[in-house]
Amino acid sequence: RLLMLVAAAEASVPSLSLLGGGGKMPMSGVGMCCRHSARGDAARQCILDFLLQGGRHLDTAQIYGNHKEVGEGVRLAVQQGVPREEIFLTTKIWSDDFGWEKTMAWVPRMLEELGLEYVDLVLLHVASADGKECGSPKQCRQETWLALQRFQGKGQIRSLGVSNFGPRQMQELFDLGGTPVAVNQLEYHPWVPTIHRETVKWCHRKGVVVTAYGSMGSNTYASQITTQEALKQMGFWHGKTAGQILLRWAVQQNVTVIPGTSNPKHQAENLQIFDFELGSEEMNLLNNIPESEHMLYFGHTPDQFQ
């Protein structure tokens, strides 16, 4: 019975194909950033709970400090019958490890921390790379990209992507002529500035899959965002929570979501966003937030850095 439920949940989450032959990314995952329950034993349990109830997309990063626990959670789930090939695991390399030599050393270390033979996606976590040994920020990003391609050739990384990048910074990687940028992960919700919306449009034109973080306003602002009357009213009409409305707004624009929670009930809710649709009036309302109300919770602006 449990396996049937898991199979049904997994099948109900659509996936997006990635450039470069890297398979498919499930459109709803769990983020492992920036909360107490994303560390230690709680992080391991979070991963196990999510995978056992049908979730398949995991998002972590070197700087989150939980590779060991995330990997343990994956291995426990595999031991309990979840096929590794169904799990899509993303991690990110921080700018401290940018550059050819540092990246060549980072990948084996990262895999050892996770205790896994491969990861599905590695993202350059940020575009800023000032004062690094590898040279200019552009040179550092390109060296890192070329080094990661070596491990992709060995099957240890399936796809490559970026986070918090703008069109110019992504085009510099496309111009290398090797592995295409498969994914760009950036802050994305109805209150983002225009440049974020324009970056998403550029990605879609190029075939780059977009992943949203901060969909519900981050831990700090979630309670303020999800109690807004318009969202609550939409939720009432659809029999959904305000958080599910925000996630649906993103996926209805072909944007993947990775809300962070270790609560199994909320994890389940975050997977149940594909059985309803927002109407055109609802989408228009959320797509036309006045510019005076635009805001960023995490402060990363595409193409901000050289």
Image (tube, rainbow, N blue to C red):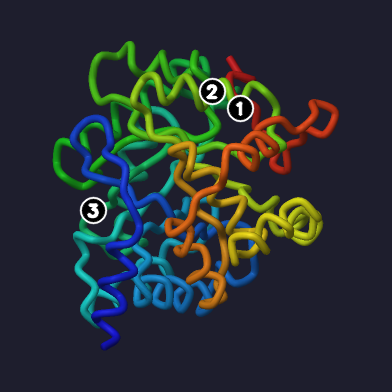
> How far across and how far down the image is residue 271, in percent?
45, 63
Task: Establish if 272 lies above or below 108.
Answer: below
| Quarter of the picture holding the C terminus | top right
Which residue corresponds to the image point at 56% horizontal and 47% vertical from the top-left? 278
Q: Nearer the viewer, mark 2 or mark 3?
A: 2
- Along the viewing direction, whichever of 196 and 90 lies nearer the viewer: 196
- Seen as rendered, the residue at the extreme right is 292
Identify the residue shown where x is 70% and y is 37%. Answer: 285
Q: CA distance from mark 2 to mark 1?
A: 5 Å
Mark 3 or mark 1: which comes first in sequence?
A: 3
> Mark 3 and 1 residues: CB-CB less than 8 Å, in contact?
no
Residue indicated by mark 3: 118
| Mark 2–mark 1 CB contact (< 8 Å) | yes
- Per the rendering, the mark at residue 199 is 2
Q: Sequence order check: which comes first, mark 2 or mark 3?
A: 3
Q: CA distance from mark 2 to mark 3?
A: 29 Å
Per the rendering, the mark at residue 196 is 1
- In the rendered image, the residue lying farthest to the left is 154
Determine crowd level at label 1: few under 14, some 14-19, many 20+ residues with C-alpha closer than 10 A.
many
Amino acid type, label 1: His
Under tag 3, what secondary structure? loop
Who is closer to the viewer here, 246 or 100? 246
Q: Does residue 7 appear to the left or right of 239 in the view shown?
A: left
